């Protein structure tokens, strides 16, 4: 396994629409392992393949329940609303207020290309939707209410949910 370089806003790879994965080759398995390692190293709760420069529809997430991968994820259902602070590993040192659904149900494929339905509320829903946006070339900064602000020390102690 190896750490990959996280691309930051301004890198055009972050604005591209990613391609579906057809099969999980050994190369893709390695990419997934590297993404998980890179996410933990950066202390994020999620990471999408374009953030490490790969234009494929792959996401990894760990909101404290252990890591999972979503390949070719598709949002099946959302409901409710939550408003909270969001950050992104590709927008270092910044955060902003974003409103998203409170609940999301996603159909994706796991690392064995088996279909899985993943449900989440609160942070898990937020992380899944944030990461799926990355696969369509979208950053949370487009959805921020008001201004982006600098992450403070206080934020670091609370929860810095960068994805
Ligand atoms: Ni992000």
Image (cartoon, rainbow, N blue to C red):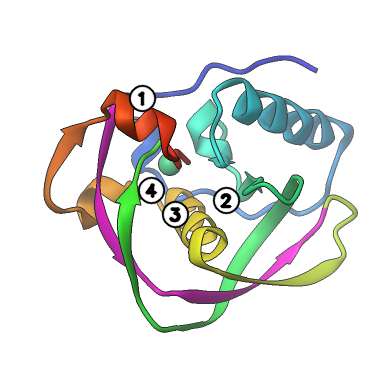
Quarter-wise, where is residue 120 in the image? bottom right
- Separation (CA) of disc 4 from disc 2: 11 Å
Residue 27 visible (yes or no)? yes
Specify whether residue 115 is painted magenta.
Answer: no
Determine whether the beta carbon of the residue marked 3 sits less than 8 angstroms from the nearest atom of ligand 1.
yes
Residue 89 visible (yes or no)? no
Q: Secondary structure at mark 1?
A: loop
Residue stretch in magenta: 92-110
Determine whether the beta carbon of the residue marked 1 sits less than 8 angstroms from the nearest atom of ligand 1.
no
The answer to whether marks 1 and 2 mark residues whose Cβ atoms lie closer than 8 Å is no
How would you classify the magenta stretch by its main secondary structure?
strand
Q: Secondary structure at mark 3?
A: helix
- Would residue 30 appear left or right of 54 to someone viewing this image? right
Figure check: 23 above or below 150: below
Nearer the N terminus, badge 2 or badge 3?
2
Q: Which residue is mark 1?
A: 8
The residue carrying pointer 3 sits among few (fewer than 14), some (14 to 19) or many (20 or more) residues within 10 Å by Cα, namely: many
């Amino acid at each position: 396994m190896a750490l990959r370089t996280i691309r930051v806003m301004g890198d055009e790879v972050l604005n591209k629409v990613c391609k579906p994965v057809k099969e999980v080759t050994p190369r893709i398995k390695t990419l997934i392992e590297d993404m998980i390692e890179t996410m933990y190293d950066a202390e994020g709760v999620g990471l999408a393949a374009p953030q490490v420069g790969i234009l494929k529809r792959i996401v990894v997430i760990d909101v404290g329940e252990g890591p999972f991968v979503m390949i070719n994820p598709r949002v099946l259902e959302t409901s409710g609303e939550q408003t909270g602070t969001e950050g992104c590993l590709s927008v270092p040192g910044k955060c902003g207020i974003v409103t998203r659904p409170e609940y999301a149900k996603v159909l994706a494929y796991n690392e064995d290309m088996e279909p899985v339905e993943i449900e989440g509320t609160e942070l898990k829903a937020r992380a899944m939707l944030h990461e799926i946006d990355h696969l369509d070339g979208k950053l949370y900064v487009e959805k921020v209410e008001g201004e982006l602000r600098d992450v403070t020390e206080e934020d670091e102690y609370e929860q810095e949910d960068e994805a």
